[in-house]
Amino acid sequence: MKRILRSHPLHRFCAIVALTIVVAAQTCLAFDPNEWRNTQTLEVPAKGLVRVNVPAPTLDAAQPGLEDLRIVDSKGNQVPYLIERLLPDAESKIRPAEFRSTIENGATNLNLRTGSRAPLVGVSLETPAIRFMKAVDIEGSNDGTTWTKLAGGDSLFRLPDGAAKLRVSFPEGAWEFLRVTIDDLGSPPVPFTGADLHKARTTAPAEPLPITIKSRDVSPGTTRLALDLGAANLTLGSLRIESNEPVFTRTVTLAVPEFGNDGICERNIADAVIYRVNMNGKNEAHLEIPLESEIHTRELLVLIQNEDSPPISIDSVRADRRLVRLTFFANQPGQYSLLSGNTQCTAPRYDLSALSGRLRNASATDVVPSALVPNPNYKPPEALAALTLTGAQIDIAKWKFRKPLPLSQSGVQQVELDPELLARSQPDQRDIRIVRGEYQLPFIFERTSLSRSIDLNAAAANDPKKPAFSRWSLKLPQTGLPIARLVCTSSSPLFHRQMRLWEEVTDERGDKFASELGRATWDQTPNSPKRDLVIELNARPQSDTLFLETDNGDNPAIDLRNFRSYYPVTRVVFKATPDPAQPVWLYYGNPDTTTPRYDLTLVAGELLKAERSTVAAGPEENLSSKPSFVGETLAGSTRYIFWGALALVVIVLLAIMSRFLPKPGQQ
């Protein structure tokens, strides 16, 4: 009798995987490994399934969607793989089947019938109250008689500044009933109108990510941190802001640079409230911001809203990144290669989706790739990303100003536009050009959330005809500065004022009139923290002198000092190599030109990811020719007076000449 052999389930699974991969490999298009910029070695000890956690440097070198990752065997053949981004399940909440609230014996009792057999890990309460602080206990039961304490002495609170803690967590478990007891002995009861039950969810592995704070900028009401993540294309699970401040509450926005129609802008990806408060003698802190987002740039921006409070000290910023895993079947032990860094290729189609569920849970050999190194046989593709970008020829005759850009390193450069340049260029910066020789260098603008301050010279400018008004004259360094905000302080302890900011401008006929730029209400009391006056301008000033005034009524005049203005920071980003024979110039000051259009879409991702060299523009050179006659130098009413006087002189001369002409009939 012939014996029938029964194979092990794992052997059958590996056979299925091998067969599927052979079929998939036959469908792979031929490729040249030398088109990939980087390589890493994978030492596979045995035949079978292999799992690789993709390191951060590999993610940084790859395309944003990891379309260019390839695994190659020792013979140069592609090996199909399955890629996984290990993410936790989305949080799931359910409403309780029954919710009852009673107040007795100095406590608010909330009785919930869950109506679910799913494991629970917490409950969030709903209330319309805007300010309260309470202690809370939670108990669970499956029969309504025998109760188990799940959480005790926890805190519930909501503060007017946005800080709130309405969720209470407890160990995972399935409960038919929950009882929430809120202590009301220290403060009046507040109404609770409903609840959400948080179901348990599967977690995902993560590893700590070292983060560097590249820059820290403080402007009125906002602290801006620029973080260097060390790599692009990372999936961040959470971000934690470390501060030693004993008590604070701040709203935080996370943003990333992104390429748009108007260049590089900032896109908000998360908002949260962080705080550290003292509740009934117990310190409560919430400093972690959940993300679960892919960050395709190396830079992450943190905007901390200080409002009228002083900036908080930031000791460090920490983050966790989710893992990215590759799984493939090795037909034999030996050396394999992991390739990355091909900006032109598309994602492979291996048709392994049918096995994805089984591959995720199958046992596999973990292999750690070697360090990322350049491919010695790399052949750059014929594409814009591999070339030095050059634009069209340009006739610079109509540009009035230029500044040198001294380059020190090759690669991507960034130049911050200074106030002098912003004042002389067009409001939309359409006249800015970067030029080398006779050709333009393509660039993109970066519109940031940063702002820089400019100190203003202030002097009293009271109008004798308005004795109840106080007026200050504010002198800007030059005409046309694109300031967006005016700030000043006061030492007066008590006042309420309507503040108005305006300037005197001249129309086409030479007539002067007051043009309002902004206004704000300013209150100050002895018991409140000192706050600055902040006026957001609704228009760009046309002159170099601004006026700030207020009606004092029958009150004494207030004292103002420390006048300063702020303008938004705009950068120009481009790619160039130093060449002493052909310096790079930044041209501006041409009102007749239009906005340049460059084919930078293909390399926008590279410009965003690349490390930039900061270039400071040199001194301004005035290229405008001198006027050919005096009339060209005059403006406003002076020009009209000049031309009127000239016309009068011509008329007088014609009248005098007519007297010397012979009259009709005279011989």
Image (cartoon, grey):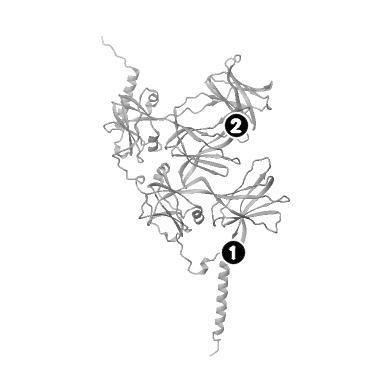
**Disc 2, SS:** strand
Q: Nearer the viewer, residue 484 or 478?
A: 478
Q: Quadrant of residue 286?
A: top right
Which residue is located at x 44 percent, y 57 percent? 402
Residue 174 in the image, given as x and y percentages of width and height? 53, 19
State how many labels appear: 2
In this rendering, the label closer to the viewer, 1 or 2: 2
Residue at the (58%, 69%) spot, across then down: 641
Residue drawn at 55 percent across, 79 percent down? 654
For residue 341, above or below residue 42: below
**Residue 476 screen position, x and y as percent:** 56, 55
- Which residue is the extreme one toward the right? 554
Q: Which mark is residue 277?
A: 2
Residue at the far top in the pictured view: 1
Pick whichever, 1 or 444, lies toward us: 444
Residue 537 in view of the camera = no
Amino acid type of disc 2? Val
Residue 221 visible here? yes
Q: Which residue bears the numbered disc 1?
A: 510
Picture quadrant where residue 467 is located: bottom right
Which quadrant is home to the N terminus? top left
Kind of element beneath mark 1: loop
Q: Amino acid at mark 1?
A: Gly
Inter-mark Cα distance, 1 to 2: 60 Å
